[in-house]
Image (cartoon, helix red, strand yellow):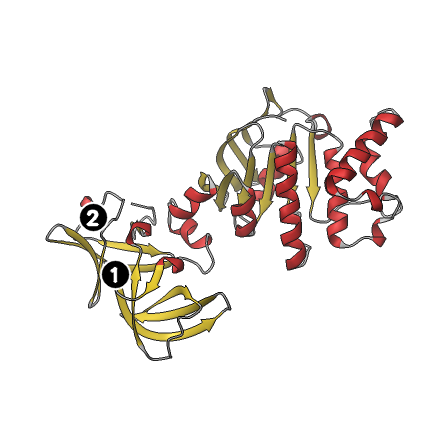
Amino acid sequence: MATLSIKGVRKSFGAVEVLTNIDIELEDGGFLVLLGPSGCGKSTLLSSIAGLEPCSGGDVIIGARNVNDVHPKDRNIAMVFQSYALYPTMAVRRNIGFGLEMRKVPTAEREAAIQKAAELLQIEHLLDRKPGQLSGGQRQRVAMGRAIVRDPDLFLFDEPLSNLDAKLRVEMRTEIKRLHDRLGASIVYVTHDQIEAMTLGTKVAVMKGGVIQQIADPQTIYEKPANMFVAGFIGSPTMNFLSGTLERSGGTLGLRHGDALLSLPGLEQQVDAYVGRKVVAGIRPETFSSGAGQGTLTGAVDVVEPTGPDTMVILSVGGQLLTARLGSRDRPKLGDTMTLSVDTAAINLFDPDTGDRI
């Protein structure tokens, strides 16, 4: 396995710049997830790492080797695609080992590598079947097996689970996590699915418009988003944004929204420069709880959505709708006046002009 360094990478198609000054450092054995909406540049960045798209500027370094001018086949990488890219006329055994066959690896060595990968992925019983006889999850395992036998420095996954149904996605996500833990592999993984990003990555890079908005471990991305885009993109239901004026009364900070005042004891951010100014409070739905507390908001119940383990309640506070994830036993009625307490230590304040976290 190897480290990955991406330094000032740019990519343009004509006059359109699709990647702007990308800087990433991935440790040996790390799992980097490139996350963002469609068209944000994450697949283009993956292609640049693979050598399928030449960089317009900057450097891609795998291990100690600058690979800018190295052909894709000589970069010692392995890619797994969402389309599986299996040969339909070949049995699973040959599909897995075909790359080794083309590199003229001796038969005994090739068979040993195929068997080891098949055992790791629990597909030994499928080795003599053709791809058309396999389920989507089984095909993806074969595609992963083909990557594993190459023993690459770096694995590249391009939205490998997007063609699977919800149940299979969960199963394969677990499989990829297990694979990373067992192999200690260095992996770059592209997805638009935040659940995949949060559960798989040791490091997540959130992208928008060809620019990395934030790169950090998943917990930091979730708890301390760098800006309102990251805050709104991560989390389901999405983060609530409550605008208001920051006030200080008797040493206590509060957010004034119309007639409502949300006290902010325990706020970790340094916000003295923003007292008396407009700010936006980012509040995760799960930080609400029913009943009074140090920081509370009161409003009219607009929507109630029981989900089984939770109840989603949409509350109208001063004309703004806020979503709260409450316990399954919390079942208010439409139109009820409801008071919710907020874990104010988990609130993030943002500058309304820049969108950046204060």
Count of numbered tags: 2
Residue 323: give x, y in percent of width and height.
39, 65
Residue shown at the point (83%, 49%) measured from the top left: 131
Name the foreground residue: 82 vs 94: 94
Quadrant in the picture for residue 317: bottom left
Quarter assignment of residue 100 = top right
Name the residue at 74% across, 45% down.
141
Tag 2: residue type? Tyr
Q: Is residue 178 left or right of residue 23?
A: right
| Amino acid type at image mark 1 | Gly
Cα gap from disc 1 to disc 2, whole angstroms: 25 Å
Q: Which circle marks residue 183 in the picture?
A: none
Q: In what quadrant of the picture does the C terminus appear?
A: top left
341 horizontally vs 59: left or right:
left
At 46% from the left and 39% from the top, the residue drawn is: 217
Q: Are marks 1 and 2 in contact (CB under 8 Å)?
A: no
Earlier sequence position, callout 1 versus callout 2: 2
Query: Residue 280 occupies which quadrant of the picture?
Result: bottom left
Disc 2 secondary structure class = helix
- What is the x, y in percent for residue 340? 30, 66
Which residue of the protein is positioned furthest toward the top in this rendering? 64
Residue bearing mark 1: 293
Where does residue 78 sit, x and y in percent of width and height? 70, 34
Work out whether residue 316 or residue 280 is closer to the camera in this orientation and state it: 316
Q: Of all residues shown, which one is farthest toward the left?
A: 250
**Does 59 appear above or below 325?**
above
Give the position of the N terminus as an image quadrant.
top right
Mark 1 surroundings within 10 Å by alpha-carbon count, few (fewer than 14), some (14 through 19), many (20 or more): some
Position of 40 compared to 52: left or right? Answer: left
Q: Which residue in the protein does label 2 denote?
A: 274
